[in-house]
Amino acid sequence: MAAHRRRGGFLPDFDPAFGDRPLADAVHDIVIGRWQGVRDLLRATGDDWPLRTHRLRLLSHAAAGSSAVEAWRAAEPHDPDAAVLRAATEVVRVFHQVIAAGRGSGLDEARLDATVLVALDAAEVHPADPMPWVSLLTVARLYETGVSRRELWRWWDELRRRDPYNIEGHVQLLRYYSARWHGTHGRMYDFARDVAGAAPLGSPLQVLVQIARVEEYRYVTEGGRAAVRDFGRHWHHELAVTDVRRTWDRWIGGRPPGPAGPEEIGELNYLAHAACYAGLNDEARRLFGLLGTRAARVPWSYTGDAAAEFTRWRAHVRATS
């Protein structure tokens, strides 16, 4: 969906493809039951792992409500891309099942085990691809008591062997370690800071600390826990501001110049949101320049109406220049 100007400003564009037109076309193909365009897109993407992961995530969400990926697998049973997309799609479907039933309703572990086997099969037929291991780290959260430490670390090691800086895989393990799932706020922040400290300059992995802060905020506010503690300075206390500055310096400061690619937009929205709430207007203004109109509903939707939040803060930081 394109952004449209209106009196007094503009509307942010929440197109989940983030301006990736070939991806948007392939998603449309899935919606109408075609898979050939998806096959061609993934072949053209090759081993550009950040872009491929971004594309597979959106394609899997589109495919979860259709039979397109099954039709592709039936027509071309030996295509490794079809196997990888099917695994990612099965993960989305089990998450939908959990959401529909309500967490804690006792999802049949046999269903989870079957999804794990589909992902392991994808990893076998496309051994270079990190995405099946991202799928495994994602579905691990749904087990009532998690998965064994040994299994989790095996999946994690396999991912890092293929793509050591895979942002989506790191986000999934961060969420696994969060208080919402199988860890604590402290374990989540330790993981985020350890990864950010070891990541090279220019890597978007620096933003894991800001993603952790959003996860904590979501857990506390959605659980009605905010009333029992002072949560007003969550975004702009001294450590939060220092973390944003560090992420800015190590990611944006080390990032090659040029426009932001679709695979960066989700993480740039996290950093822009954090910079706004930390009062770092100069950094926020430059981040909005990289984003243009490309907005992600998360994290803006956690602090208000997403479109209103993005638009209000964009206008605010531009007015302070």
Image (spheres, rainbow, N blue to C red):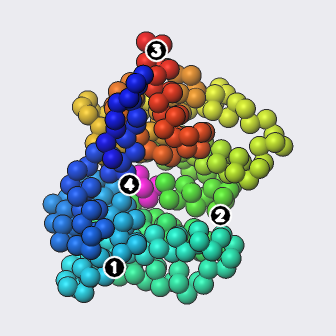
> Cβ–Cβ below 8 Å for labels 2 and 1?
no
- In percent of the image, x 52 and y 70: which residue is there? 96
Secondary structure, mark 1, is loop
Secondary structure, mark 4, is loop
Q: In the image, residue 85 lies at what x, y percent?
A: 32, 71
- Label 2, label 3: how far apart the Cα atoms are: 43 Å
Extreme residue toward the front, this view: 7
- Label 4, label 2: how far apart the Cα atoms are: 21 Å
Badge 4 or badge 3: first in the primary sequence = 4
Of the two numbered discs 2 and 1 in the rendering, the one whose residue sits closer to the viewer: 1
Return the residue at label 4: 166
Q: Residues within 10 Å of mark 2 (few under 14, many from 20)?
A: some
Badge 2 or badge 3: first in the primary sequence = 2
Residue 310 as seen in the image, left or right of residue 291? right
Q: Nearer the viewer, residue 214 or 65?
A: 65
Badge 1 or badge 3: first in the primary sequence = 1
Disc 2 marks a residue whose amino acid type is His
Q: Is residue 169 visible?
A: yes
- Label 1, label 3: how far apart the Cα atoms are: 49 Å
- In percent of the image, x 43 and y 76: which residue is there? 90
Disc 4 marks a residue whose amino acid type is Asn
First to last magenta residue range: 165-170
